[in-house]
């Protein structure tokens, strides 16, 4: 299983080249039966003017991890995955270190998927809770 998991994570990380995920230094680091984890460093490049992690960067992390999870758990040969709605509640500020987003599948329908995404700091404290809805569109 570890070899399979490492291969999938490698493909996910390779697909981030020349994208927003690369710009934000998002890396996919863990994978399970119904979840994907990504991490992002908290540096001045993702701060808001007062020196804490920008909420928009957290939402970008959440959508990136949730959308990649949809891609993994669907037949990517047959479908495009797009995020269609995201909601976020930020509960804690972070100034430095790393944050981790864990996207867990709540509902896998034929067309839409619902993801619960919890963002935590390096000590495991909850930073943000996000809900992402993705849609699978058939490739033509």
Image (tube, rainbow, N blue to C red):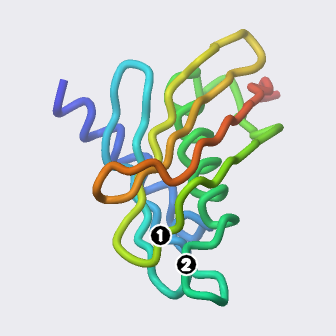
Give the label on residue 119, or none: none
**Upstream in the sequence, badge 2 or badge 1?**
2
Asked if residue 128 is positioned above or below residue 117 in the image, the reply reads below
Is 135 displayed left or right of 96 in the figure? right
- Closest to the observer, 92 or 27: 92
Q: Nearer the viewer, residue 15 or 69?
A: 69
Horizontal placement of 26 versus 123: left or right? right
Tell me if label 2 and label 1 are in contact, CB under 8 Å: yes
Badge 2 element: loop
Dot 2 crowding, Cα within 10 Å, few <14, some 14–19, many 20+: some
Q: Residue furthest top?
A: 110
Query: Disc 2 and disc 1: Cα gap in Å?
Result: 6 Å
Q: Which residue is mark 2?
A: 52
Which residue occupies 66% across, 89% down? 49
Between residues 125 and 27, which one lies in front from this camera angle? 125
Describe residue 13's horizontal placement relative to residue 104 as left or right: left
Label at residue 94: 1
Name the residue: 31% across, 59% down.
Answer: 122
Q: Position of residue 72 (x, y in %)?
A: 50, 30
Q: How many marks?
A: 2
In the shown orientation, is residue 109 left or right of residue 105? right
Given the current orientation, which residue lies at the most extreme left position? 2
- When asked about the image quadrant of residue 59, the answer is bottom right
Label 1: state its secondary structure.
Answer: loop
Image quadrant holding the N terminus, namely top left
Place of residue 84 in the rendered image (x, y in percent of width and height, measured from the top left): 82, 37
79 is higher (above) or lower (below) than 84: above
Instruction: Tell me the quarter of the picture where residue 6 sits.
Output: top left
Q: Residue at x 57, y 78 (%)?
A: 46
């Amino acid at each position: 299983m570890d070899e399979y998991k490492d291969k999938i994570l490698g493909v996910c990380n390779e697909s981030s080249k020349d994208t927003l995920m690369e710009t934000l230094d998002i890396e996919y680091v863990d994978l399970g039966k119904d979840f994907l984890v990504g991490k992002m460093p908290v540096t001045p490049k993702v701060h808001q003017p007062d020196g804490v992690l920008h909420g928009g960067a957290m939402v970008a992390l959440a959508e990136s991890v949730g959308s990649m999870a949809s891609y993994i758990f669907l037949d990517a040969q047959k479908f495009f995955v797009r995020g269609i709605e995201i909601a976020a509640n930020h509960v804690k500020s972070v100034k430095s270190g790393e944050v981790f987003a864990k996207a867990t599948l709540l509902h896998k329908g034929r067309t839409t998927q619902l993801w619960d995404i919890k963002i935590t700091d390096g000590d495991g404290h909850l930073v943000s809770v996000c809900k992402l809805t993705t849609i699978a569109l058939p490739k033509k």
